[in-house]
Image (tube, helix red, strand yellow):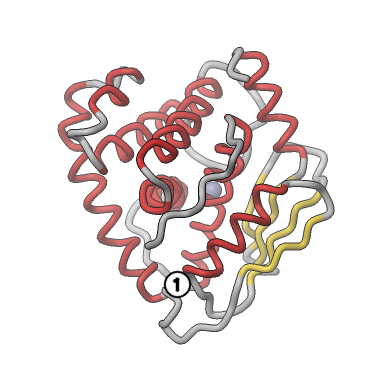
Amino acid sequence: MALFPVPAFADFTENNLLAIFYHELGHAVIDQMQVSIFGQEEDAADALSILLIDALYDNERAEAMAYDSAALFLAESQSTPAFWDTHGPDAQRFYNTVCLFYGANPDAREAFAQEFDLPVERAETCEDEYALAVDSWNAVLDEMSEDAGFSGALILRAQGAMPVLAREITALNAEFKWPRNIVVKVMPCDEANAFYDLETQSTTMCSELTGWLSGIAEAEGWN
Ligand SMILES: [Zn+2]
């Protein structure tokens, strides 16, 4: 896969909007490509998010994105917020995220694992965990590669501003094709949430996510 262009400005909010979007695309791919999931679909979607971050960006940007994604799960695991999507405990998602990103390149990412206190016993299995995730996801992504014969694309319908998504969708459409068009809605939903709707086969990114994420960054002093 080609490396994505690095936006001139990226921060905690933008990095997590992308990580959340990739997670939701995981649900969309599982539905559209009829992927068999062994285990929790939420874990598989989180794994795709990390895998795309690792594959689509250069190491420095990928590390910043994985860092911010893990930091969000860590912050969430320490509070009782209204969090996005339905999923396992945030502490578990935090360790899965750190482990998979570390496992993608253990030699270069020891400091990353240490910074997040990844337990040594868990760290030992991360390379295998990543290899497993890559095996299953890459087979599906290969089927969706540009020359695979599908002609569907992601179609952005934005009522609220989330400029990072427009850039991202253009880049993703150059890499992957879908069995049908998948509408991506950016709209107010009265909550900071994101979801893939099986009935309409569309993905929704609630416009409240932006303010919610920048509020967390502000509260944690990350901006
Ligand atoms: Zn989910």
Residue at 71% across / 48% down in the picture?
Answer: 163
**The image quarter in which residue 113 lies:** top left
- The relative height of residue 141 versus residue 134 in the rendered view (above or below) is below
The x, y position of residue 117, in whole percent, is: 31, 17
The x, y position of residue 45, in whole percent, is: 45, 51
The x, y position of residue 49, in whole percent, is: 45, 48
**The image quarter in which residue 167 lies:** bottom right
Mark 1 within 8 Å of ligand 1, using the beta carbon: no
Residue at 69% across / 49% down in the picture?
Answer: 205
Amino acid on which disc 1 is placed: Gln
Q: Which residue is mark 1?
A: 34
- The secondary structure type at the circle numbered 1 is loop
The x, y position of residue 147, in whole percent, is: 42, 82
Q: Nearer the viewer, residue 204 or 217?
A: 217
Determine crowd level at label 1: few under 14, some 14-19, many 20+ residues with C-alpha closer than 10 A: few
Single out the residue that lies furthest toward the bottom.
149
- The relative height of residue 22 versus residue 213 in the rendered view (above or below) is below
Q: Quadrant of the N terminus?
A: bottom left
Residue at 84% across / 54% down in the picture?
Answer: 159
